[in-house]
């Protein structure tokens, strides 16, 4: 049975995004897990826990994970939000990450980006930046 690395992956994503110069240029270190303050400073990025599909092969186990980074920015148009989405895609596309507990993200790909109006803020924008990751550990 595959190990569940949902929490370790989400924590590694937040840490890596906060360490990224491209992301810092847009959100200045405001990268969070699923919980964000009631009245956060914009722009910011939030990661929900990933979705896991367990996988096993000879000598390793892990899983395929789908996750999204949610970029929130304000402006007359979607420009700032698009910059944040591009920074997130640049930070993670085709990268590897080490996870707590010895697992490794061995494949990581940006799969799509969608930018929509944020319904709670008149000048708010929301980008959903989606990724696919393969996490493995030796058994």
Image (cartoon, rainbow, N blue to C red):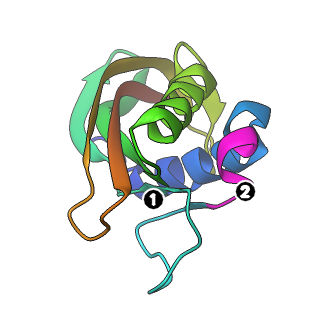
Residue closest to the far front: 76
The label shown at residue 36 is: none
Magenta span of residues = 24-30
Q: Position of residue 88 (x, y in %)?
A: 54, 33
Residue closest to the far bottom: 38
* Circle 1 residues within 10 Å: few <14, some 14–19, many ≥20: some
Q: CA distance from mark 2 to mark 1?
A: 20 Å
Question: Viewer-proximal residue, 48 or 56?
Answer: 48
Q: Is residue 118 visible?
A: yes
The label shown at residue 7 is: 1
Q: Is residue 73 left or right of residue 16?
A: left
Q: Residue at x 56, y 45 (%)?
A: 13
Callout 2 secondary element: loop
Is 127 included in the stretch rendered in magenta? no
* Circle 2 residues within 10 Å: few <14, some 14–19, many ≥20: some
Callout 1 secondary element: helix
Q: Nearer the viewer, mark 2 or mark 1?
A: 2
In which image quadrant can residue 113 be found?
top left
Q: Residue at x 65, y 51 (%)?
A: 27
Question: Viewer-proximal residue, 59 or 132?
Answer: 132
Is 29 included in the stretch rendered in magenta? yes
Q: Residue at x 65, y 61 (%)?
A: 30
Q: Position of residue 42 (x, y in %)?
A: 55, 63
Question: Can you say whether 83 is above or below 68 in the image?
Answer: above
Q: Quadrant of the N terminus?
A: top left
Q: Earlier in the sequence, mark 2 or mark 1?
A: 1
Q: Residue at x 35, y 50 (%)?
A: 125
In which image quadrant can residue 59 be found?
top left
Residue position marked by numbered label 2 in the rendering = 29
Q: Are marks 2 and 1 in contact (CB under 8 Å)?
A: no
């Amino acid at each position: 049975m595959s190990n569940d690395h949902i929490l370790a992956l989400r924590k590694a994503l937040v840490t890596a995004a906060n360490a990224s110069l491209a992301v810092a240029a847009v959100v200045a270190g405001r990268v969070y897990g699923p919980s964000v303050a009631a009245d956060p400073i914009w722009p910011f990025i939030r990661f929900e826990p990933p979705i896991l599909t367990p996988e096993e092969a000879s000598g390793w186990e892990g899983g395929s994970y789908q996750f999204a980074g949610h970029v929130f920015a304000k402006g007359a148009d979607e420009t700032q939000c698009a910059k944040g989405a591009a920074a997130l895609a640049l930070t993670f596309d085709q990268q590897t990450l080490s996870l707590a507990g010895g697992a490794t993200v061995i494949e990581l790909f940006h799969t799509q980006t969608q930018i929509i109006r944020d319904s709670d803020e008149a000048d708010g924008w929301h980008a959903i930046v989606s990724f696919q990751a393969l996490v493995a550990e030796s058994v």
